[in-house]
Amino acid sequence: MNIVVCLKQVPGTTKVEIDPKTNTLVRQGIKNVVNPFDAYALEEGVRLRERFGGKVTAISMGPPQAEEMLREAISLGADAAVLLSDRAFAGADTLATSYTIALAVEKLKPCDLVICGRQSIDGDTGQVAPELAEVLGVPFVAYVSKIEEINNQNMRVQRMVEDGHEVIEAPLPAVISVTKEINVPRLPSLRGLTKAKSAVIPVWTAGELAAAQDRIGLTGSATKVVKIFFPQRVRKGEVFQGEASAQVASLVEKLREAKLI
Amino acid sequence: MGIEIDLDKCIGCGDCEPACPFGLLKVVNDKVQLVEGCTLCGACEDACAYEAIVIEAVAPAPLAGEDHHGVWVFAEQRNGKLKWVGYELLAKGRELADTLKTELCAVCFGHGVNDVSELIAGGADKVYLVDEPALASNQEDLLTGGLVELVRQYKPAIVLAGATALGRSFIPRAAAILKTGLTADCTGLEIDKETGLLLQTRPTFGGNVMATIICQSRRPQMSTVRPRVFRRGVPDKGRQGQIIKVDFNKERVTARTKLLSFVEDITERVKLDEADIIVSGGRGLGKADNFKLLEELAKVLGAALGSSRPPVDEGWIPYSHQVGQTGKTVCPKLYIACGISGSVQHMAGMGTSECIVAINDDPNAPIFEIATYGIVGDLFKVVPLMIEKLKSG
């Protein structure tokens, strides 16, 4: 089974702090890491390879330093990795990103399954996986929490919805996005670390992907950010004082006054 | 294409440094330097008085736009029942359509969907209803293909959909086929008075940064919006509107995936997204068993039971209870957070609640910053006292 796992390098913390003086995000000391949701995608890919054989290729679109993350993916069990990097890719929205990744998946064919994390923790859109499926013209299942059964033609998966889960059958090749419920990612093995050190990670540019210039990067993007600002938290509430019972009494009184209870 | 800094023009004033929301610009030896990671947002370009920073964007292709009219809302149904989020979007869509002086349409796919006329009472001028047995279970290949066909036929300028599990899964696919822009999880939508473009504002970086996004030259402009972000209007039963039945093209669109079964999570006694009051627990609960205490409080209040992410990760409570960035967005009248410190991700899911009560033993917990009322104390003392007080009337 040939599997492609899509990874994104993101700032290694969800606690992004804002410097009150400059009103910008504090980036000092923040290491870039693999998007946490993508770690589950990689683990699932490696597990499938261990059961069925084949190959897991980790791919990422990003700046040159994303190579480090792909090396980490190899230490975690990926057989190979490819970095899609070109200045022409910069400023891509999900439409341009999914097109670019689709070209790479086509180039890596045969591919039975593409696995993505449910969303990135920086952009948070969760749109690349479904858009990628559509560019590739293959079925898509979002929020997969368990692969119940899989063979070269078909898979049966559980996918999470608001009030429970659905069991869905889909033919392969396909694209899925996975949730953190699907597995517990492993730590790098010693063998993996050795392999990662010497691995050659090819860099594919727009030219190598034969990408249409008007479909990549800023030019290929349908959306554009016109303004960025910081939300102001204005609410300043009342913290009760005194004995716990007195505090509870004040709270209940306030809530009743406001007819909230 | 990209960001270009003209060092001859740069005088090292440093005005661009604070403008960059990602802190990527630094003046070194009187010249600005850019660290890797630029998203080409353009904030620095506006801040530079010397035109030393240029974001070189290719001129937008003069694509369709003129011939696209109307605001559409995808009215999601489940088991024949229309979801609340559709009405919320109709209320917002009505504002947008009125500003643009255009029509508001609801689009509904399903079989034997109840109360379709409610969509007109909710603000729609027209309802495009696609009724077909195969659509009853929301098979996503059919919805994707069906929506794309309708969009191509009727050419709306704007399409809004709920950022539900379904919407977040198939709407991007439709956008990819239409090769247009889609902005996820918008919290603000308005029309730019000058250009008539849809200004789509959404949180990013875990809610730390807000970005306003446009889709300039492609149509339709598409957005998803989480449930409970906008408020449903008061239904106007007297409103006039048209229900237009549209045939589903079975030959052109085929279903590849198949829904075999649905397993409902039955621990959710009161539905989170419909509850007026939510009692929610966090890491401070310590173990699964302690949720019983919150269940008791919830029962006394007739509230739904919520959770932040750690208890879900620990397996103390099922995912369907999770509130936050990767869980549900809720907007109850009253949200009682017990032992929740208040990560930005959690607050992104409940920050718009009318009244927030925080109970936490750490006086510095961020949750107190957004709480309407706070009690600094041990939840295992405070919550039983609350239950007692509420029971005693």
Image: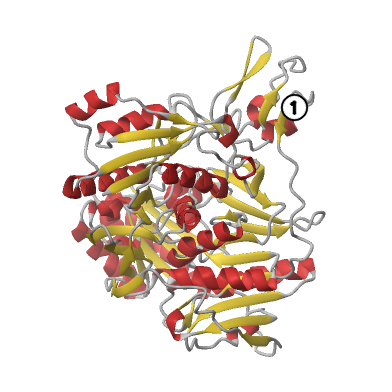
| Residue A258 vertical position relative to residue B288 in the rendered view, above or below | below
Q: Residue at x 41, y 54 (%)?
A: B326
Task: Assess disc 1: are there few (<14), some (14-19) or many (≥20) residues with their C-alpha within 10 Å of its C-alpha.
Answer: some
In this rendered view, identify the residue nearer to me: B302 or A24: A24
Task: Judge left or right: residue A54 versus residue B10.
Answer: left
| Residue A254 vertical position relative to residue B287 in the rendered view, above or below | below
Quadrant location of residue B232? bottom right
- Could you tell me residue B161's position as x and y percent? 56, 66
| Residue B330 showing in the rendered view | no
Q: Residue at x 59, y 41 (%)?
A: A216
- Could you tell me residue A132's position as x and y percent? 47, 52
Give the farthest residue toward the right.
B194
In this rendered view, identify the residue nearer to me: B360 or B86: B86
Residue receiving disc 1:
B48
The kind of residue tagged 1 is: Cys
In this rendered view, identify the residue nearer to me: B7 or B191: B7
- Could you tell me residue A245's position as x and y percent? 33, 59
Quadrant location of residue B191? bottom right
In this rendered view, identify the residue nearer to me: B381 or B9: B9
Quadrant location of residue A207? top right
Q: Residue at x 73, y 29 (%)?
A: B54
**Helix or strand or loop: what does disc 1 sit on?**
loop
Give me the chain letter of mark 1: B
| Residue B381 showing in the rendered view | yes
